Image: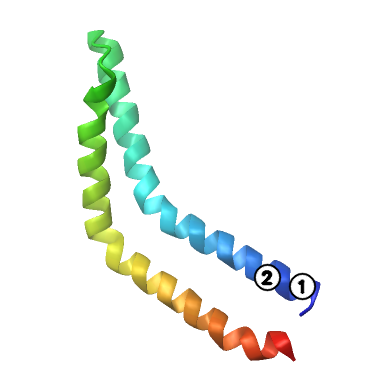
Amino acid sequence: MTDSSVLDIALQTMLVALKLCAPILVPALVIGFVISLVQSMTQIQEFTLSFVPKLIGVGIALLVSGNWMLHTLVAFTEDLFARIPSLLG
C-alpha cells in the first residue's frame, strides 16, 4: 500500500462524506437562518421555536435524498472492497 493510494482513499472518503452530509445540513442551515431572521424581526427569542421546523426539514430531506445517499454509500463501499486486492499486492 503506497502513500498515494492511502491519500486517494482518504480523499474519496471525505468527498463521499461531504456529499452525504450536504442534503441534510443545507436544509437545516437554511431553515435555521430563516427562523432566526423571523425571530430577530419579531423579537421573539424562543430557542425551541426553530427545532420543529428543522426536524421537519431534515426529515423531508432524508425522504427525498435517502435513496441516493444509500446508493452512493453502497457504491463507494463496493469500490473500496474491489480495490483491496490491488492495495495488498
- Residue in the picture at 27% in, 25% down: 35
Kind of residue sitting beneath label 1: Ser
Question: In which quadrant of the rendered image does the C terminus lie?
Answer: bottom right
Is residue 63 depicted above or below 5 in this figure? above
**Residue density around tag 1, few if under 14, some if 14–19, many if 20 or more, within 10 Å:** few
| Front residue of this view, candidates 64 and 82 | 82
Instruction: Say which element carries label 1.
Output: helix
Kind of residue sitting beneath label 2: Asp
Residue 29's disc number: none
Residue 12 on image: x %, y %: 59, 67
Residue 3 on image: x %, y %: 79, 71
Residue 55 on image: x %, y %: 24, 40
Residue underneath mark 2: 8
Q: Quadrant of residue 88?
A: bottom right
- Residue in the picture at 77% in, 72% down: 4
Is residue 46 depicted above or below 20 in this figure? above
Q: Is residue 26 left or right of residue 61?
A: right
Residue 13 on image: x %, y %: 57, 65
Question: In which quadrant of the rendered image does the N terminus lie?
Answer: bottom right
- Residue in the picture at 72% in, 75% down: 5
| Front residue of this view, candidates 34 and 45 | 45
Instruction: Say which element carries label 2.
Output: helix
| Front residue of this view, candidates 88 and 26 | 88
Q: Is residue 14 left or right of residue 60?
A: right
Q: Is residue 12 left or right of residue 58?
A: right
Residue 4's disc number: 1
Q: Contact (CB < 8 A) between labels 2 and 1?
A: yes
- Residue in the picture at 23% in, 11% down: 44
Q: Residue furthest right?
A: 3
Q: How far is mark 2 from mark 1, CA to CA?
A: 6 Å
Q: Quadrant of residue 66?
A: bottom left
